[in-house]
Amino acid sequence: MPILTKRPNKAPLGLYIHVPFCRSKCQYCDFYSLATKDDKIIDGYLDAVCDHIKEAGELAPGYRVDTIYFGGGTPSFFGADGMAVILTTIRRNFDVANDAEITFEANPDSVSDRLLHRLRAEGFNRVSLGIQSDDDEMLKKLGRPHTYAQAVTAYHRIRKAGFRNVSIDLMYGLPGQDIYHWQQTLDNVLRLLPEHVSCYALKVEEGTPFAQMQEVLNLPDEDTVADMYLAAVETLRGRGFRQYEISNFCRKGLVSKHNLKYWTGGEYLGFGPAASSDFAGKRFTLKRDLQAYISGIRDGGNIMEDMEEIPMRERAGEYLMLRLRTSLGIDPQEYEKLFLLPFAPLEDVLEQRRRSFHATQNDAGHWILTPKGYLVSNDIITDLLIAQDESHPLKRI
């Protein structure tokens, strides 16, 4: 047994691997990715990521990796062989927990029995399947490279390969979509019985094809989108799912442990172009350019887009913003202990929101938002940040 595994009290660490390859770009996507299967480019990426992992592993001897997430892009399009090489490199250079959550994202059109059985054998234990809609015409509008029938087939293949933790991604607020069609999508997809569902409202981002045609997209209005969100909350609750974050729902005990790190201030390291990290008190993002990333790793050049050390008061604000996204909520005692700031001014804001049924307290005394509160979360967070900025540090005892 490696000596590293015997060392107690290691800090938990998440790893994110950005796989920037897709069969094609979706109309709404602003994530960094390339529509290519060029072997030379892919081999250069694989070498760079593995070398980067080897370098980073030396900086984290006091950490134990408990989550690994392959996102993109489309990791399933990248293929099992490359992901297996990366995972092996991680295990050789980091102390990976035996029960680590290891996830890969997949598109239905690139799911095969060979890919699934290989990754299951390598130790992957969670799949995030991007279905988005059950309407083939809508999938075409979105630029998705699959049909709903392919999505259902892919899901059943994932189950047959032995995966017992499957998440499904869905989108609402889509062009021409109404509440009836969204409810129909939920009902159809939930018949598959996934363990986890993510529901994201379409956001038209600058620089995407949708941004150039926004005037003719026939998007539902804000009130309809809000109704769609509340319908998802109610439907999923009725099917046994627990809402643990604004957009995420799971069956008991099956939260996305990796994503929860982002929302609870956990430490994580990102690899691949455009990947972000929050590690050792610093936050940094890698260059959004594959060739720059490859050459930087190969030649020892700069691969950072930006890096900053986050002041404690800013961390306090992030604590409020991120925790209110989750069912964990804000713990008044934890807030004062971590940031030496008074909670009373924030409690005044939250009490006002309680009266409008936007906020409440759970059994542990933590402040959480209600589903209706999530719809106006930006306003609530703004009020909290103003109250925080006007507060004075607590005196140390």
Image (tube, rainbow, N blue to C red):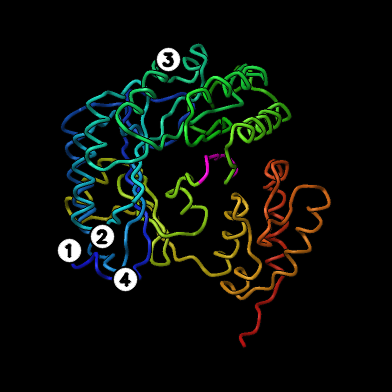
Q: Are marks 2 and 1 in contact (CB under 8 Å)?
A: yes
Q: Residues within 10 Å of mark 3 (few under 14, many from 20)?
A: some
Q: Are marks 2 and 4 in contact (CB under 8 Å)?
A: no
Quote the CA–CA distance across marks 2 and 1.
9 Å
Mark 2 is on which residue type? Asp
Tell me: 347 left or right of 307: right
Q: Residues within 10 Å of mark 1 (few under 14, many from 20)?
A: few
Quote the CA–CA distance across marks 4 and 3.
48 Å
Earlier in the chain: of badge 4 and badge 3, it is: 4
Residue at 48% of width from left, 51% of height from top?
Answer: 260
Element marked by disc 2: loop
Mark 4 is on which residue type? Pro
Mark 1 is on which residue type? Pro
Earlier in the chain: of badge 3 and badge 2, it is: 2
Element marked by disc 3: loop
Earlier in the chain: of badge 1 and badge 4, it is: 1
Residue that carries the numbered disc 2 in the rendered image: 95
Q: Hey, which quadrant is residue 213 in on the image? A: top right
Residue that carries the numbered disc 3 in the rendered image: 147
Residue that carries the numbered disc 1 in the rendered image: 2
